[in-house]
Amino acid sequence: MDSEFFSDYFVLKPGEGGMMDLFHLLFSHNMENNRFVECPQGTELREARRRWLIFVSILAQKILILLRKPMSWIGSVIEIWLNLLSHNKNFFTLLSNLILGRVVIPEKASTYFKSTLAYLDERVELDKEIKHGDDRYCTALSIMAAKLAYENKAFVQRIVNDHWKMVFMEFYNCWDDYQGRFTTQAFMFCDKVVDPELIVVAFRGTEPFDADAWSTDVDYSWYEFPHLGKVHAGFMKALGLQKSGGWPKEIDQGKDQPPFAYYAIREKLREVLKKNDKARFVVTGHSLGGALAILFPIILALHEETWMLERMIGVYTFGQPRVGDRKLGEFVKKHPSIRYFRFVYKNDIVPRLPYDDSIFFYKHFGICLYYNSCYGGKIVEEEPNKNYFSPWSAIPKYVNATWELVRSFIIGYMKGPDFKEGWFLRLFRVLGLVIPGLPDHGPQDYVNITRIGTRLMPSHDNQSIKLD
């Protein structure tokens, strides 16, 4: 590895080692000769607990590698089946169409083809009670944009233009220089054609059946940058870290070059912001998309793009994993123009990853707005049960998962038809009885937070919270 751009690094390579390497991870503190690990010479891990967590991370990633094709196949079958039912209205109409030879076959790139997550929460309309200028507006718009980021370009464009009556600007399918493939999806839109005043950048998060994305979430690999501290390697790569150049301020983004998320989005933002002095922007994302959303302005700050940061209203993330160490949080604090608000719903497992304790360095930073399963919110430094696997929280988590399943049958009567949950989402809630906290990661509860939750809404003028 070219370590010219890092002061230190520790990268896990789950596909390259064998059982003996796994065994050595547990009992040998010498890391440099382990095929699972890429690190500087002389790197040692003397803490047994830290070696155990690295062991678990590699084991989880190896399992996900084995499951990559089955997960992809299952995900495709579920997605196509859901779209078949939807495009043919219902199961009985589908059977009738099969008999009559009139089956409507969904096309993956069409304006009505939806992802699996879109079938969990089929809401596409913005909350009509939250108007432009309200304290809740940017937060409510952000979660809907973060949810929409999982969809294909044609679907996104239709929703933004036809349903939201806003202006679709760009759709990005971006390159990972390390993996040598397209991994990152994002889109950008604004509130009006002429002189837009609000621009939204939304990053796609972890797709349910994407084993590679889940591997990134459980990966403990990191790079240490001189000014930033230790930052999650996978998230940096997905954002556009250059294999042979680190984070240069400018790169060649010619027609023959694949787009890199940070550079492509920054270029478009520069163009729009320079044309309109009134324009401001927000950045958002759910899950892994939230990690990319907060890292985007951090790299802007690293490149001293102060004028752009001053035009940013805020970063709104939902169910976001940890992205770096305490030094990274201190870097953000030194840049008050990075107004950062992190939303966490109840037992959502992803904000509790990667592991954080006295030995590991991963730390959350910024304002955390935590909501319980009745959508009551409070401001906390860290979500309760910050590492998820506490034995003391096991029974309460299963009790809460049971309540969420019961709630799915009554919330439509309690809060109105906009909150009614369908059969597919209820099946997903059943999964919570096995793995509590997994259904909590879906975007449906984060949408509910913005619509019926306690109003802990960020002030747009400074990094503060307004409580109603």
Image: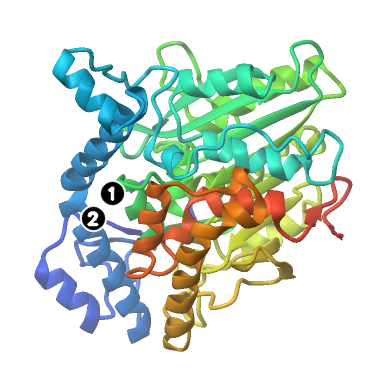
Vertical arrangement, residue 115 with respect to residue 387, above or below: above
Q: Residue 359 at what x, y percent from top left?
A: 47, 80
Indicate whether 157 appears above or below 57: above
- Looking at the rendered structure, the kind of residue marked 1 is Ala
Q: The C terminus lies in which quarter of the figure?
A: bottom right
Res 60 quadrant in image: bottom left
Apparent side of residue 241 relative to residue 282 in the rendered image (left or right): left
Q: Closer to the camera, 107 or 341?
A: 107
The 10 Å Cα crowd at callout 1, few under 14, some 14 to 19, many 20 or more, is: many
Q: x%, y% of residue 421?
A: 49, 49
Q: What is the C-alpha distance between the residues marked 1 and 2?
A: 5 Å
Point out which mark residue 68 bears.
none
**Mark 2 sits on what residue?**
64
Q: Is residue 286 left or right of residue 431?
A: right
Q: Secondary structure at mark 1?
A: helix
Q: Position of residue 131 (x, y in %)?
A: 82, 35
Residue identifier under label 1? 211
Give me the residue at 60% from left, 61% from top. Answer: 344
Identify which residue, 241 or 216, lies in the foreground. Answer: 216
